[in-house]
Image: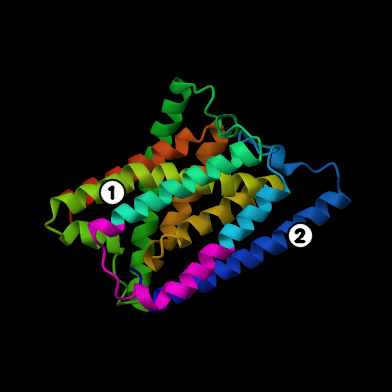
Amino acid sequence: MADVFTIGVLRDLAILVAIATAFALLGYRTLRLRCPGLSWNQEGQVLTRPYSVPDLILLALLGLFFISTMQASAAEQADAAISSAGIIISMVFNLMVCLALLMYLHRLRGLNPAELFGLQHVHWRSISRVVLVFAVVCLVTVSLVAIGVTHWLQSVWPDLQPQPLVETFKTSDNLGLKVLVVLAAVVIAPLAEETLFRGFVYGVLKRYTDIPFAALASSLMFAIIHQHVGSLVPLCVLAVLFCIAYELTGCLLVPMLLHMIFNATSIVMMIFTDA
């Protein structure tokens, strides 16, 4: 896991993002009250109108929970080791959060997640074209950003370590552990994280702000939750690209597939190179 200093930096950043989001929500509400004709949240293909105040409250509670968890566990995480049991627990937790969110939307809010996330009528031909183009864009753009960030961090943070999961995959001789890492990265993470961050967080923020702010804020949250300073900017850029692809199609399956492709390609690169 991340060391205490890294957790502290990311926790402070998470608090700043939360405060900025709160002020932005107030600011956008004021603008809409003064200019009723403005309707930024209706642009793009992502459906946001069904979201309402309870969803905004849930989003705030999730943010507070995550920040408090970072603060409470900072001391323990420095010495924590990644194990097969830990990866399994993490996968189960992610799936449970995803399932709980879907149950909340369906049972408590009376919404249809398939309709909300554009999964009812999937046009595979158009989706395939978008996924193909954006897969290349994501891989090239994020790779260039990662190279630049790594070069810069070498001068300001020379002892920054790789992501623990990446280091575990590269150094471990345990085949079962590596299989679990692949399963977590290529299947579980794309399903759970896209449902939460692109489907819910981005959708709710877009409903009450606009596309650019919602994309940036949700992408920062997505990057912070990975708890690695070196990956913060590349992951944020990647998430913004996911938001753009989602808006172009209105189908959450697109960022899910892009997420799977990106993680799978990263794992293949780790296997055959030292990158």
Q: Is residue 260 magenta?
A: no
Tag 1: amino acid? Ser
Q: Position of residue 4 (x, y in %)?
A: 39, 77
Which stretch did the figure color magenta? 64-86
Residue 222, given in percent of the width and then of the height, sits at 48, 55
Q: Residue at x 40, y 68 (%)?
A: 229
Is 132 placed left or right of 62 in the picture?
Answer: left
Q: Quadrant of residue 188?
A: top left
Q: Is residue 28 above or below residue 227?
A: above
As drawn, the residue found furthest toward the right would be 34
- The image position of residue 260, as x and y in percent, is 35, 41
Compute the Cα span from label 2 to label 1.
39 Å
Give the amino acid type for the residue marked by disc 2 in the picture.
Leu
- Residue 119 seen in render: yes
Residue ID at (39%, 61%): 231
Rendered view: 5 above or below 44: below
- In the image, residue 133 lies at what x, y percent? 41, 34
Q: Which labelled disc corresponds to residue 266?
A: 1
Q: Secondary structure at mark 2?
A: helix
Find the residue positioned furthest to the front. Answer: 107
* Colour scheme employed for the rendering of this structure: rainbow
Q: Earlier in the sequence, mark 2 or mark 1?
A: 2
- Report the side of 75 relative to 114 (left or right): left
Asked if one can make out residue 241 in the rendered structure from this viewpoint, the answer is: no
Q: Is residue 228 left or right of residue 109?
A: left
Q: Secondary structure at mark 1?
A: helix
Q: Are marks 2 and 1 in contact (CB under 8 Å)?
A: no
**From the image, which quarter does the C terminus lie in?**
bottom left
Dot label at residue 26: 2
Query: Along the line of sight, which residue is nearer the eye, 86 or 124?
Result: 86
Q: Main secondary structure of the magenta part?
A: helix
Q: Quadrant of the N terminus?
A: bottom left
